[in-house]
Image (tube, rainbow, N blue to C red):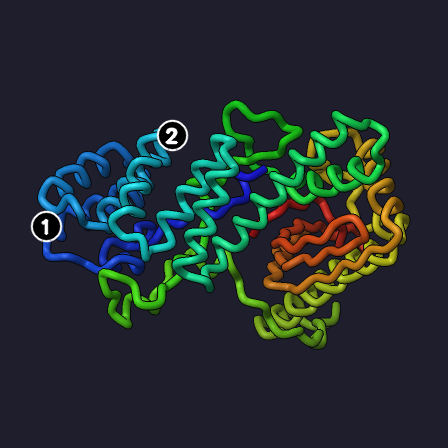
Amino acid sequence: MLQGNLRFSRLAALLAASIAMVVFPALAAPADDLKEAQKLYAAGRLQPSLDKIDGYLKAQPRDPQGRFLKGLILTEQKRTNDAIAVFTGLTEDYPELPEPYNNLAVLYASQGNYDKAKSALELAIHTHPSYATAHENLGDIYAQLASRAYDRALSLDKSNTSAQLKLSMVKDLFSSQKLAPPPGTTPAKSEPTKVAKAEPKAEPKAEPSPPVTPAKAGAEPAKVAKAEPKSEPAKSEPAKATKSDPVTPAKAGAAASGEEAQVTEAVQAWATAWGSKDVKGYLAAYAPDFETPAGESRDAWAKGRTQRIEAPKQIEVSVQMKSVKVSGNEATATFRQNYRSDALKSSNTKTLKLVKVGDKWLIKQERVGG
């Protein structure tokens, strides 16, 4: 579960080399070497980037930018222990910076060491209480620890229906993630690799040391908006082009806006059916070729979902739309999902891929995350 859902702080190394990293201040050093290493990293040339950053760090061994970039490179090279050593060193030399703690947590979670991951995230939050990425990651860690506890409870008492329900619902939070699982995990755990690929917000920190200039503190990588899109105001549905009229660019835009509104309505109707325990309406929101999370048959998936909806006495589901994108007969909707029942409470970002079947938008794929 966790390696796929925890968000990894990457900083601005993914941007053009002309843009400085936003978390750490630039130091007097061979800046050209650092910029070149950033370029190579952004281009996916990991080993040349590592060679360049090693040369840079010989001249500036304590430079946080260079060390952080080295940790990112080692992570993508699957050299987890070496990356842990780099980020641990950063937490020791710059304990006021939350990003190294967050990345340590992701690496620990990828090894199944959730207690260490939890401690690292708590330190990240302690240094920067408004660091949303660390808070969300900590929630995922708690969910994994809860899953293990429910597993243990069931091993001691297989008739414990309450533990069975809670375990299935915790797993369901993450089972819809569709990316490939990391080496050594099984599909049942649903732990897709998103450690080095995630795109979290590189949050500015209060009173960091070394000091951050106001311009750098306000900058954010271009990909941050994709990971944490802002909620958009509800859109009214403009008039659509009629068949007899040629579709001008303005009318095409209006039609697209109307489709976005229809997609939003479809998502809201899906959540309403779920919250009202309307199993028939809930299942009807899915396309005939819906891609089931674990690759099980449609009937098996529907049976499992029916049990999870009917088992709680009460369910509350609300969604806060973040973005809707329509392309022809396909659409992608990303939103914040808040779920509450007598057995479980959760809040996470979810993305639905929908297809238009007739005049209805139906869910073809769902996954946790943006």
Q: Residues within 10 Å of mark 1 (few under 14, many from 20)?
A: few
Specify whether 293 is left or right of 121: right
Label 1 close to label 2 by CB (< 8 Å): no
| Amino acid type, mark 1 | Pro
Residue occupied by mark 1: 30
Residue 336 seen anywhere in this rendered image of the structure: yes
Residue 328 seen anywhere in this rendered image of the structure: no
Q: Residue at x 51, y 45 (%)?
A: 6
Tell me residue 141's x, y (percent): 56, 43
What is the spatial separation of the Cα atoms under label 1 and label 2, in whole angstroms?
28 Å
Please state which of residues 145 and 277 is positioned toward the viewer in this rendering. Answer: 145
Residue occupied by mark 2: 78
Please state which of residues 54 and 222 is positioned toward the viewer in this rendering. Answer: 54
Please state which of residues 27 and 159 is positioned toward the viewer in this rendering. Answer: 159
| Amino acid type, mark 2 | Lys
Residue 210, picture quadrant:
bottom left
Residue 336, picture quadrant:
bottom right
Going by the picture, which residue comes out furthest to the front? Answer: 156
Tell me residue 226's x, y (percent): 49, 57
Q: Residue at x 24, y 69 (%)?
A: 213
Q: Residue at x 17, y 47 (%)?
A: 62
